Amino acid sequence: MSTTIAKTETTEFVNEIEAIYEQPVTYKLRASSTWVTKPNKERTIFESLATIDLADKKNYTVQPKNPNPPPIHSIWLERFWFFYTVSPPLIIHALWYYIVPENNYFHTWHPLFAFLFYSVAFFLIITRIADHCHYYMKYYGTFDEHNRPRDYVPDKLVTRLVMSVLIYILARTGGGLLLGGYDRNSPPSLGHTISWFFPIKIGVWLIVLDFFFYSYHRMTHTIPFLWKIHSLHHCTKHPTVLQSILAGDIQELIEIFLIPLATSFVLPLTVHEFWIAQCVLIYMEAGGHSGIRAYWPHIILYEVLQPFGMEICIEDHDLHHRYGKSGMNYGKQTRVFDRIFGTISERIECLQK
Ligand SMILES: [Zn+2]
Ligand SMILES: [Zn+2]
């Protein structure tokens, strides 16, 4: 597998992190990824954690061209999977609240305990999402796999990726508790910390967030200073699931803190709505970077946006990475603003007949 591919294709690639900033990554060249071939006991703690991102070996080798168009993946199957995966922490919290007597000190959760509980839960959900994507990457294959397979995380970026994921988990969980105004005395259940209309509320929130994200993301591709910040995320043409979180420090600050903060000023969510919304975000981010070769649209916004050709699917962000700096498909939750502002690109494999 991989050692040969990784080594032969890296001969011209300057294998330093600075080079990733200063030199455009070309379609064929790939950074060195020797960590994937190391025996487990020789891996650093960061390399061991980065194995969460490893898909099947098949996805890292060129495949024969698939003559069939990508299948349409069942959105209802995904909705069921998502509910089944994301709801246990909410159910545990609610059961705890209603079962432990009110006069018991532990009836409600201290904010610090809630932070730890939801951080661990978020980590476990991210690993479940990664496994889920890996299963379908193997089952359906990946886009453009007949030309070029997926990229391993480069050696130089393993530590940064793992740190980015950990910061992402802690910041998004803590930010959700703060922005949602966590109140330990509010019953953690439907009608209290979760509106009965939460899918609509979260759907609107995601569209507002996508407006802020689109604006920021398009600027990063057109303003040289911002491209320097964003180019780290574009060090791969064919990313994998966790590489969705790979970013430079400033980009992390903007994406993890400022964009959800701005969105929450426009439409505040409660603490548990925020939890669901951030799970949708990471689920869509992971899918968008998995390259799964299927028509796989947004689990909340599909029916609303599809009649207008504004629904997003996995191929859209996959193409964004192939375009690199030249851009197109800047939205990550919708194609609303790409459609309005003329930055939408035609799908390739999903248009196959
Ligand atoms: Zn970009
Ligand atoms: Zn990306």
Image (tube, grey):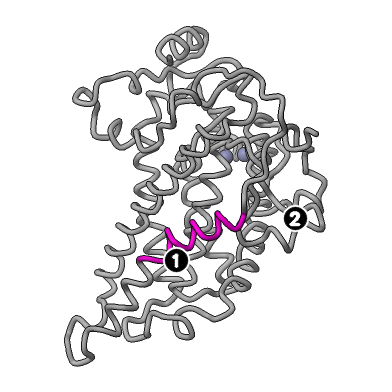
- For the record, the magenta segment spans 75-88
Q: Name the residue under label 2.
A: 336
Q: Is residue 110 above or below residue 49?
A: below
Closer to the camera, 293 or 213?
293
Q: Is residue 22 above or below residue 344?
A: above
- Per the image, is 279 magenta? no
**Quadrant position of ligand 1:** top right
Q: Which residue is drawn at 58% across and 31% down?
A: 142
Magenta span: predominant SS is helix
Q: What residue type is labelled 1?
A: Trp
Residue 44, percent from left and from top: 24, 29
Residue 275 has which mark? 1
Closer to the camera, 322 or 220?
322
Residue 247 visible somewhere in the drawing: no
Q: Residue at x 54, y 38 (%)?
A: 290
Neighbour class for label 2 at 10 Å: few (<14), some, many (≥20)? many
Quarter where residue 35 is shown: top left
Quarter where residue 116 is shown: bottom left
Dot 1 falls on a residue whose secondary structure is helix
Q: Which amino acid does label 2 sit on?
A: Val
Residue 331, percent from left and from top: 67, 49
